[in-house]
Amino acid sequence: MNTFDLQISRFGEMAILLQWPQEVNELILADILAFVEALKSQDRSDWEYVPSYNSVTLISKSKFDFEQEKKLLLDAYSKRDGHQNTTERHCWQLPVCYDSEFALDLPMVSEKSGLSEEEVIRLHTSEDYLVYGIGFLPGFLYLGGLPQSLEIPRRDDPRVEVSPGAVGLAGKQTGIYPQNSPGGWNIIGNCPIPLFNPKLEPPCFVKVGDRIRFHAITKAEHKLRKIESEVGIYNLNKTLIDA
Amino acid sequence: MGVPVSGGMDALAVRKANLLLENQPNDAVMEITMTGPTLLFETPTYICLTGAEMAATLNNEPIKNHNVVQVKAGDILSYGKLESGFRSYLAVKGGFLTEEVLGSRSQYFPVTVSKKLLERNEISYFETKRYDALISDPKLENHFNSNFLEVEKGPEFVILGDAQLAELFAQEFTVSEKNNRMAYQIGEKIVGHKHTIITSGTLPGTVQLTPGGKLLILMKDGQTTGGYPRILQLTEASICTLAQKRAGDTVQFKLV
């Protein structure tokens, strides 16, 4: 197992930020997930973990002694190899409609990337994206592995409202807005499958470390899939990933 | 999974209300923003108001913040003019018995069905006929009168240049119209930047700086991760102070 240079810093009165090197890298994510699993196997019920790309934010329910926690964490990191990782990973196939009704920024993405709109869609549906984080909003997936030619910066000023299911691009990232929200990503399509349902256990079927593959659908199919998932008869396609 | 911590924006006011009624610290209280409702109690209980002062009356008799007040079946609690702060809290003995979702009684749409109570909604609570409060009139000062927000350095504090630092700590800022339970936006912009960070965790009280120079302060229903540099982090007490500010109020950052 690789060992990375771990930076541990205080993040306000209630949290600790663990940072791995500043890069998007599958090996870093694997190390983070292994470490979080090892930490969760200990008795640390006072802490909540938010893993994302190259960091984990540890949020405490009560005030804590930072220097003492830092020592414990460094010690646990050096011993994480001893913990057996047992989580199964899946690749989920999700439909996306790239019709102009949803793809508000597709013309702009096409212009900035120098690619035709069709080529943007072909490239966007050509990768098994790695789920580097779930956050921002309930069920919002941060996906990595975006083709370099689709790297478009975040909008300088965020939109006041983005619709549920909106699929966006921002820098090296792509993702789906699970609900109405303000948002700074460039919107290129819409996914009719909701990613968060508090009545289900777990509320979000995807886990950090899973993969997502998009496929293009028509407006008519988008409408159909939306109804299917609302009444609870949509069949999610997934495949098991060999670790 | 991206679910915010949610709960009362002014956690100190919530804690005081629950403490004075000898409730559990996480018992549900009602958060009342800017203007108050008229509430009919159908079951006897004891109540305590904290946070913003809104000229509350019980059956037309004024009641004071931080007092434990007995309420009988048929009593009517109503609120008048906002006198100080922005968010008032109403606690009942034993807490409000609203729906529990993901281990919380907070309302946060779309994790819960609604984000606020509507006219003619009914909420349950336990009946309490007789209770002797340990403290009845504690003469507490409000904790939110100051306009200083105490902050620690955030994870990306280091990206700030001399011009930005001077702007941040030498002037007063105005709370803009864009303020809600997710975030408070500051009216004035400071010098922008070209730094991008890899998406990472955010907390209530995280101050983000957008490339355009806007300052966003995340609050209790705020996003759990974000991509704008996290330049400052409000102390827990200052989150409560800010929760009591409204559009047009001024605030000043103070590094601790």
Image (cartoon, coloured by chain):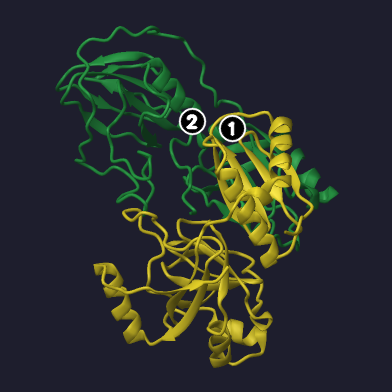
Chain colours: A yellow, B green
Nearer to us in this view, A16 or B175: A16
Q: Is residue B256 visible?
A: no
The amino acid type, in three-letter code, at marker 2 is: Ala
| Rendered location of residue B128, percent (x, y) | 22, 17
In this picture, is A45 found above or below B137? Answer: below
Q: Is residue A126 visible?
A: yes
- Who is closer to the viewer here, B249 or A128? A128
Which disc, if any, is residue B149?
Answer: none
Q: Nearer the viewer, residue B237 or B179?
A: B237
Whole-number angstrom distance, CA of label 2 to CA of label 1: 8 Å
Q: Residue at x 63, y 39 (%)?
A: A15
Q: Decide: is A186 above or below A54.
A: below
Number of on-image labels = 2
Q: Considering the numbered disc 1 on the image, is that residue within a helix, a strand or a loop?
A: helix
**Quadrant of residue A115 within the rendered picture:** bottom right
User: Which residue is at 75% across, 63% downward?
Assistant: B194
Tag of residue B236: 1
Chain of the residue displaying label 2 = B
Instruction: Name the quadrant of the C terminus of chain B.
Output: top right
**SS assignment at label 2:** helix
Q: Chain of mark 1?
A: B
The answer to whether marks 2 and 1 mark residues whose Cβ atoms lie closer than 8 Å is yes
User: Which residue lies at the image location 25% right of the left edge and 32% below the top edge?
Assistant: B38
Tell me, for residue B11, which label it has, or none.
2
In the rendering, at what x and y percent does residue B115 appear?
A: 35, 48
Left-right relation of B93 to A204: left
Dot placed on the residue nearer the N-terminal end, 2 or 1? 2
- The x, y position of residue B113, in whole percent, is 30, 51
- Please state if B10 lies on the left or on the right of A169 as rendered: left
Q: Amino acid at mark 1?
A: Glu
Which quarter of the picture shows residue B151? top right
